[in-house]
Image (cartoon, coloured by chain):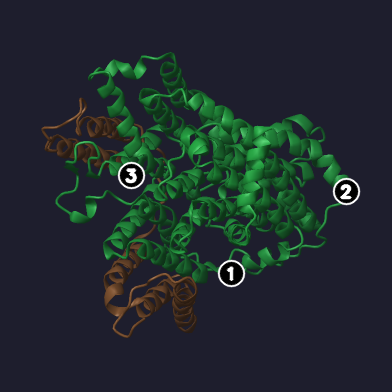
Amino acid sequence: MSDRIFGVVGLLLAIGFAFSALAIEESFLSDAVGPKAFPLIIAAILGLSSIVIAIRPDAEPEWPALGRLVEVGAAVVVMILYAEFLPIAGFVIATAFAAAYLAWRLGSGPIESVIVGVGTSLGIYVIFHLVLGLSLARGPLGF
Amino acid sequence: METFASLADGFAIALTWQNLMLALLGCFLGTIMGALPGLGPSNGVAILIPLAFTLGLGATPSLILLTSVYYGAMYGGRISSILLNIPGDEPAMMTCLDGHPMAKKGFAGEALSLSGIASFVGAFLATWGLIFLAPQLVKIALLFGPAEYFALFALAFMTLGGVSSTNQAKSAFAAALGLGLATIGVDTQTGVPRFTFGEVHLYDGLDFLVAIVGLFALSEVFIFLEHRHGGSDAEGRKLNIGRLYPPMSMVRKCTPTMLRTSFLGFIAGVLPGAGASLGSFISYSMEKRLVDKENTFGTGDPRGVAAPEAGNNAAAGGALVPMLALGVPGSGTTAVLLAVLLALNITPGPLLFTQNPDVVWGLIAALFIANFMLLAMNIPMVGLFTRVLMVPSRILMPIVAMVSFVGIYGISGSSFDLLVMIGFGVMGWVLRKLDVPLVPIILGTLLGNSMENNLRRAVTIDNGNWWTLIDSPLSIALWAIAIIGFVLPLIVGARVKAKMHQRRDEEGAISD
């Protein structure tokens, strides 16, 4: 069933891709092929392979239980927040929180999580910023 | 003789303190990444790409660092195969079959050092193979026009799925997805924006480094989160190694095996789409058929340890041949290495050998040096790397995730790229669940633009005649191979793949 849904989604993606390819505005100065042809070929392959996937599905993959899905979803949310807050809070603080969260969700105890979070953050800061001179996001506190 | 002169020049380039230190660092990190289950060669190289850039390294030093990681990961993969019966990376799968039984019989140290020697022999011979085969391939490639290049790219995509996936439709889907992603951004020939939906960040196209790190490294973190696999695989087990050097008689007994499988692995590596996993698989099965008279394979036969290790390391070297000579990588990790070259504004392919001989020969010399370093690291110091196996993934995975973020942020300094990377991470996770191979996606995003440019150049040169694509004998031959490579696995591939896939789960989507 998963593969059938996947095939249908893929087919919709291919159709959407083909339509936006057709909508590309051509410049008056164009080569013989133009900017549309290659994307249209790709859309055709994408569509055909999606149809095959939908018609001949593989065995069902093992989907995680709902709780696990929420887990992955929550991690995604934390990562998005991390990306957004990085320039605001600064590298060290944001990274410590994100790393501690991930460590906690992978089964560390509270104290270990904090240690992993702070350790990862400071470790990366020292190695990448102080030693290697990579510019990391600066927060209001200067780090 | 010319070859040796070039090689000598290469050593002159590689033998600087900076390059030696980078090779050492790369070998060390690579072995660790190979040893840790969950981090393979393509992940390892992907995570370290940003490091190479932020260090401000030039082309040759970056390549030296990253190929050392690549070779190191190939060496390291066997450690957890032998000690824990869990392959550290995919090519090390076959090493479990005899390596772990040997360890159970109390010969862990012998198995580790023997496989270290086998890795060395495989990689060493493959590097020689690279030296002699790549220039020959370059001579052929110089005959290629745009139409032939287009056919060659098609060949790479069509054969890639043959081994890496169980389902050809899914690998075709993955390739098309990657190529489609590559078309995002301003069209290079006419300057019109495509698929940007008005988002300014997308005008430059998607950065393939962002895609690679997201697909490979972040999706791994999600897999671990999903299984809440936070412990260490080595927990509660005694990693007893014993003696560190194999008896000479054992090495002598395995020598013919190592030589044969090095050759076989090298060939498997050179072939497009095959890579190291196939190299170790066919090496093991051939040796089993050839020398296993007493049915000792699978019960801890030293030859069964030497065969796949020599095979997969030789394949790693072989896979560099098409990457350097044609600009078309044959495996996941070489695709990632290609990304490094492209990001450094170096176009691999036949011209690389004439325009940047320092890069090519410096790299080859560095491979020899890295090989000796790895041998030294992997025999006396193997105990150090076994300790690494004790690091639980609840500590390791946050570090992997954060280093990925730092690396990408360090390159671009924009939160937008981080969001794109997270998107790729989620996509990678879903696709791995659905058993869609990720390597064709990477290859598509990497090669998409030059594939399209070659197509358009070929057709434009011939005044809009599309038949020009199959006009020369060379391009017809390439198309024929491509079609055979796509169709053949549908017919005979099912059996081979079933055997190869017996031992793997969703790890298989990142195949090398």
Instruction: Quickly name the residue at label 3.
Output: A2
Q: Is residue B56 above or below residue B151?
A: below
Q: Quote the CA–CA distance across marks 3 and 1.
A: 35 Å
Q: State the residue in front, A83 or B111.
A: A83
- Is residue A76 visible in the rendered structure shown here? yes
Instruction: Quickly name the residue at label 2.
Output: B248
| Chain identifier, colour green | B
- Is residue A52 visible in the rendered structure shown here? no
Mark 3, secondary structure of its residue? helix
Label 2 resides on the chain identified as: B
User: Same subunit under labels 1 and 2?
Assistant: yes
Residue occupying the point 25% across, 40% down = B188
Instruction: Quickly name the residue at label 1.
Output: B391
Q: Three-letter amino acid code at disc 2?
A: Met
Q: State the residue in front, B61 or B76.
A: B61
Label 3 resides on the chain identified as: A
